[in-house]
Image: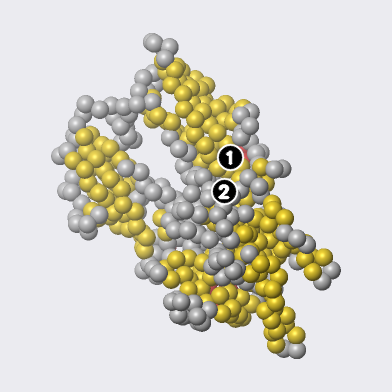
Amino acid sequence: MHSYYPTAGDTIKYFKYSGNKWTGPFNLFNGYIAPALSITGDTMYFQNNSVPYQTLFSVRNGTGWSNPQRILYNLNSAHYFQETNNGNYYVSSISSPSIGGSDWCKLFINGADTTAISLGLPLNSGTEDLDLFVTKDESFMIVTKYTGNTTKLYISYHKNNGNWTNPKNLGPVINFGLGAWGPYVSSDNKYLFYTAGTNPNYSDTYIRWIRVDSLIDSLKHTNFVPYLKNQIPNLIDTAGHFFNYTFPDSTFIDDDGNNTLTYSVTLSNGGALPSWLNFNPGTRTFTGTPTTLGSINLKVIAIDTANTMAYCIFNLNVVDHTFIRESNGQIINEYKLFQNYPNPFNPGTVISYSLINNNHVSIKLYDVLGKEITTLVNSFQKRGMYDINLDMNNLNLASGIYFYNINVRESNTNNVYKETKVMNYIK
């Protein structure tokens, strides 16, 4: 079963396969799109075709289906609701934080409360990520990605750590036209059904089907293109002071293994580095003593053994010595609680904060209801930059949204600095 792009005449239809041929289509529900079946096949999920998009369901009743009823009342703009054998739910929705306008997300349902958490990079992009299909065993998902003015089908595989691989194009046999969308894979993971056409007016748009089990297996063993996972932050250094910065191994990810990556650095325009700045590709470390003030844009390039690449551009600003500078290259001129990194995360993340004076510091972790979970810091600390390595496995917490709060009391004035940030923990 399938649907086209949303229009007033959208209809969910079905075909029957009998006598080695298909018959149909037969109308099932008018005004709805994006159908998906439950694990047992006796419930169908779909959505309406007007904003805000709503998720509905219908239950098989003998040879027919019940009237549609809405679910996920507090989650608007939900597309392509999917259910898996592991009791997980996936959807395209607006999440916070998000990569693009709509992200492919995992749902966390707690009674009437539903939260959509983006699956993040590299699966999502900066565009509207809408059509998706997740297999019942969660071994892979097929998604529709925008490529120029067309849409193509891509496949992403589920990794052992719970993340998803960099999506791969399913190739010209499947992506032959001006658009391909609405993927659906049979329960045995052998046959792909989707919609495609070659004419701009969609006059030759048809439902296609093709056997894909050998393709799915072979693509899993071809080279994965590396990607930028965590942006290198903009840095500040002071002229005349030694600069030393190492970007983490998690900055770039190669699903074939990060040991395949080699690194190089240029200016963002391809030019050579300034004479005072050195880069060690083996340790991913920048060193040198700045001699002039100013801002430079640096481009870090990661290349795998198949000669495919990813890159990251960040800014290094050299200022004079009137700022307070710590040994890690950060400029400290304000109290600041930073966003945890990475976010979303599983199971570990880093919380950073800066102090411009010697102060008593308290940092606590709370759940979504405001209940205190634990105290991460409660001590008098000198000015500087600090990192907290938080491992949620040690706290035995469920996936979801949590808050962390800093409370800094200045000893000389009793002024209080407070700030709260949100973190997303995904098991």
Residue at x 36%, y 19% (from the top left corner) = 357
Give the amino acid type for the residue marked by disc 2 in the picture: Ile
Percent position of residue 397, x then y: 65, 39
Label 1 Cα crowd, 10 Å radius (few <14 / some 14-19 / many 20+): some
* Residue 19 in view (yes/no): yes
Q: In the structure shown, which secondary structural element does the residue marked by tag 2 occupy?
A: strand
Residue 410's place in the image compared with 58, above or below, is above
Front residue of 195/420: it is: 195
Residue at x 72%, y 43% (from the top left corner) = 111
- Label pair 2/1, CB-CB below 8 angstroms: yes
In the picture, measured across the screen, residue 319 lies left or right of residue 122, that is left
Instruction: Say which quarter of the image contains residue 358.
Output: top left
Give the amino acid type for the residue marked by disc 1 in the picture: Ile
Residue 237's place in the image compared with 7, above or below, is above
The residue tagged 1 is 401
- Tell me the distance, in whole angstroms, between the alpha carbons under discs 2 and 1: 9 Å
Q: In the structure shown, which secondary structural element does the residue marked by tag 1 occupy?
A: strand
Residue 285's place in the image compared with 236, above or below, is below
Q: Earlier in the sequence, mark 2 or mark 1?
A: 2
Percent position of residue 70, x then y: 69, 53
Front residue of 236/32: it is: 32
Instruction: Say which quarter of the image contains residue 185.
Output: bottom right
Residue at x 75%, y 60% (from the top left corner) = 67
Q: Which mark is residue 117?
A: 2
Front residue of 12/180: it is: 12
Percent position of residue 350, x then y: 48, 38
